[in-house]
Image (cartoon, coloured by chain):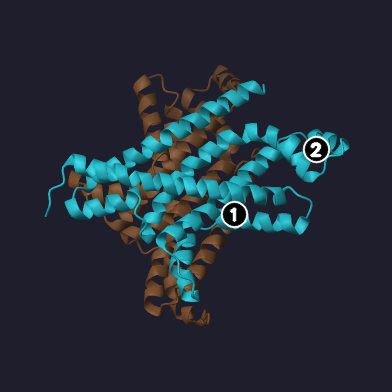
Chain colours: A brown, B cyan
Amino acid sequence: MSYQLDFGALVQYLGLFLHGTAVTLGLTVLASVVGIVLGIAGAAASSSKFLWVRRLIAAYVELIRNTPFIVQMFFIFFGLPSMGLRLTALQAAALAMTVNLTAYAIEIIRAGLEAVPVGQGEAARSMGLRILPVFGLIVLPQALANVYPALVGQITITMLESAVVSQIAVVDLTHVADYIQSRNFRSFETYLIITLIYLVLAVLMRRMLAYAGRGLFAGRVR
Amino acid sequence: MTDFTLWDIARNLLLAARWTLLLSAIAFAGGALVGLLLLVIRIGAWKWARTMVMLYVELFQSTPLLMQLFLVYFGLPRLGIEVSAWLAAAVCLTLYSSAFLTDIWRGSVEAVPRGQWDGSASLGLHYLRQLHLVILPQATRMAIPPTVGFLVQLVKSTALASIVGFHELTKTAQILTNATFQPFVIYGLAALLYFAICYPLTDLSRRMERRLATDTR
């Protein structure tokens, strides 16, 4: 069997490619923003004086980090309706990605907080600042600067892993690929192009976030 | 419709977990072999070969594993190469893990002090002997904790093989769900099984990391 590669057959689907890219990026941005905010809260609460709070957070982090994302997503999308929580595919995907990223963000940011010298907080306290400003203005920025590269890595992983949301029929980049190749039977070309789009997105995302990090944490990112 | 008791579900999932373990083992063994080969090139003397390995690692770390699977499973047959779900999953996960393992191990090798290379070279050892006798034994100590940590990622990644129809834990959970309409219980159990496989590895990796940190202090 001789097969002629034909990438020209894909040009007519440009609009779909753009739509899929927008969905993939949109989900990633949403999960990242919410995940990091919750990650900060979770990381701060992991040094709570209440044992049950620490236990609860540790259990959540371990449970998510030691199970596959696709199973988490299936559980949320197919399993939760029997508990009365019915979500659309897009909502389930967004929730699954956020739940997943939050666990990793807690772990990463907690490591960042631990790396901030205790004297930083103590000095700020001795100057009369309250607990919250000490955390928000002194400790947290240093902690985030410590682990910024790891956070960027985790966001990129979330974006790449989001390819499986196509399995619950969210029209992301991967779903677009499935659709197009079922139309024109050019599965090799279609998947190759989509893979390249993911590659470009991942590389650009890392570059841009690294650039943004230099601005955000001027000089503090290692 | 036959009735499935909770035990039937659990038993089927447990049996399916064997395939998850087997696929993980194959991918790890294959990945370690390919990864070691790539490592030797990656820290070797040829600049262009080093660049090629860097690109290889970047390619696998910056594209979704699912796309890699689809390219092999759905894409290759279009070019006249037929692949089974088994083969596609085994090959993809092997390549995928080789890229990550090479990268992890490169870090460990680079953490061996430069003087060890110079010292062993001054004893007249050539490159492969240096690696075998001096560098790798020291790098291995540092490489083991993150390697075990990667195993967790690999076990979780095998769940994607379900999408190309490989009957491991996740696929079996899907089939059982379709037969029994109990997604909450079934996906919950599947998650617990993955946890039972992965958590001991996570814990082991963490313990070893801690011990290494105190040893070198």
The reply to whether discs 1 and 2 touch (Cβ–Cβ < 8 Å) is no
Disc 1 residue crowd, few under 14, some 14–19, many 20+, Cα 10 Å:
few
Q: Quadrant of the N terminus of chain B?
A: bottom left
Which residue is under mark 2? B117
Residue drawn where x is 44% and y is 63% of the image? A22
Q: Quadrant of the C terminus of chain B?
A: top right
Secondary element under disc 1, as helix, strand or loop, is helix
**Residue B72 sits above or below residue B159 on the image:** below
Q: Nearer the viewer, mark 1 or mark 2?
A: 2
Chain designation of label 1: A
Residue drawn where x is 45% and y is 53% of the image? A161
On the image, the x and y values in percent for residue B191 come to 33, 41
**Residue B201 sits above or below residue B45 on the image:** above
Residue drawn where x is 66% and y is 54% of the image? B54
Q: Nearer the viewer, residue B122 or A125?
A: B122
Which residue is under mark 1? A208
On the image, the x and y values in percent for residue B100 come to 57, 48
The amino acid type of the residue labelled 2 equals Trp
> Which label sits on residue A185?
none
On the image, the x and y values in percent for residue B190 come to 31, 43
- Inspect this view and state whether residue A212 appears: no
**Residue A140 sits above or below residue A10 on the image:** above
Secondary element under disc 2, as helix, strand or loop, is helix
Disc 2 residue crowd, few under 14, some 14–19, many 20+, Cα 10 Å:
some
Q: Nearer the viewer, residue B117 or A19?
A: B117
Q: Is residue B182 left or right of residue B173?
A: left
- Inspect this view and state whether residue A85 appears: yes
Q: Nearer the viewer, residue A41 or B24?
A: B24
Chain designation of label 2: B
